[in-house]
Image: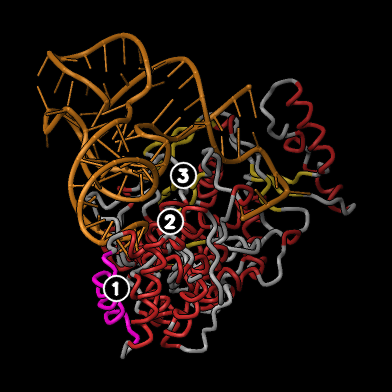
Amino acid sequence: MTATTPRVRFAPSPTGYLHVGGLRTALYNALFARRYGGTLVLRIEDTDRSRYVEGAAENLATALAWAGIDFDEGPGIGGDHGPYVQSERAAMYAGHVTRLLDEGKAYHCFCTPEELDASRQRQIAAKRDAAYDRRCRSLSEADVRARLEAGHPYTVRLKVPLAGQLQLRDLIRGDITVFHDAIDDQVLMKSDGFPTYHLANVVDDHLMGITHVIRGEEWLPSTPKHVLLYEFFGWETPQFAHLPLLLNADRSKLSKRQGDVAVEDFRAKGILPEALVNFVALLGWNPGDDRELFTFDELAAAFSLDRVSKAGAVFDMEKLRWFNAQYLRALPADALTTLCAPWMREAGFDTADQARTETVAATFANYISLPSEIGAFIGFLVHDTVSLDNDTQRAAVTSEDGQRVLARFAERAAGLDAWERDGIKAMVKQVQQDTGVKGKGLFMPLRLAHSGEEHGPDLGIVCELLGREACLTRIHACLE
RNA sequence: GCACCCAUCGACUAGAGGCCUAGGUCGUCACCCUUUCACGGUGAAAACACGGGUUCGAAUCCCGUUGGGUGUACCA
């Protein structure tokens, strides 16, 4: 590694949303930059006009900001190496393509998509490598000029050496050898005049002074083409680090098909950014000790590429939920309430009373991993009547002891001074003494009568939340 | 098909030749705490893909096999 400070980049294509795999790539780049005092660049790779999605770049920026990843340079941020959107850099690529053409390191290709497709089919049918057959590589100079003048559409392809091999070093995987004859004559410039990813990313990384290319493993097979390009241009090659993929449960590349993958999906679900970042950071990297809970700054302090693993990591929603629960419980009451309130309203709870809403949210904080789950616990606060759904429950309430407990509770409740949890608990103790019924026989009829549930928070809390009137109404409904 | 990458509990991983009776976390199960549940605590079950080497000694190094993944576009 050179002594210069590192410059790294996250270079997503604006396809509409930020994939969690992309988030992790961005995160590792950010952590690397912070750890070594480097610069983090955001670059938008939008050279495919047919895939243009309105507002996608803005979505990307929003999701990244939500996750707490701050860029030093990029669109809307500025920097000395702009523009940071590839569609605005067209002239730079054109100049470099011309140079390659002039030096005989690239050539014009006039094959139509249909011809290429047919050729590919033939090769596959013959069980051969499905690479481009290089027919335009041997076109004479006059032939090329004639077609150009006739206005034939063309692409420009990389003139890969026919023999020999190439060595590339990956910071995570070590040395990799690839034979030139296994490398395709990649299209560098499309017939619409836009560069392909391969050309644009090499030109931009060089022009932007990128020292470390940290990206997903799906790029490993095309890295030899990039290395060749650096050689052809006579540029110093950046260091490469290919991150292991994020996987579905069946170990295929994490995809939309098998569940949520967009950062905005997790956000909408109530996953906290700190939880997502913490979880995703540990998918493919670990600090070397037993720590699991990390803030961004702690991650940045501990991060290093040589602790990144090579094998892909399954994205386990259950563990994400656990992380989220940890962060949810650490939240101050007002923040927790802000997150839960929409779901409480959806369950029919009136959140107008802020103090009461906070009390309810705090009461169930230990019961949920996602804010949306609170709805399942507050039904008894919303509905006026309680229904018991099995005979055992009904028996607990209608039994002789149950009826005595309920009746006594109602009498004492009517005369209790302040209606709050501790007083109510003390009162239940008195009901126990009055009736001689204790334990399950005492608590279960009361709990069922109030909430209709066998489980839940302390009875005192349940009663306090309901209020004296509601409690008395429910008890009387359960008395013959 | 071809190229490349990868391979420790169900999942995320620790392990860089003896510290391994393979450790931690999620999940699962049991017990404790609790009126109950949740939280919390304690504990358990659970893995070095296989076969050859190298070595006094291999989860760790080498080779092969098998398995999996990615790529193979005028997409990124």
Q: For the residue marked with disc 1, what is the amino acid?
A: Val
Q: Which residues are magenta?
A: A419-436
Residues under labels 3 and 2: Cα distance? Answer: 12 Å
At x 44% / y 48%, what residue is drawn?
A: A243
Residue A138, relative to residue A302: is it above or below? above
Q: Is residue A429 magenta?
A: yes
In the image, which disc is placed on residue A431?
A: 1
Asked if residue A7 can be seen in this view, the reply is: no
Q: Which mark is residue A323?
A: none
- Label 2 crowd bin: few (<14), some (14–19), many (20+), radius 10 Å: many
The kind of secondary structure element at disc 3 is: strand
Marks 1 and 3, how far apart in space? Answer: 54 Å
Which percent across, then down, holds residue A424? 31, 79
Q: Judge whether A348 appears above or below A275 on screen.
A: below
At which x and y percent is residue A457?
A: 36, 68
Label located before the other in sequence (1 or 2): 2
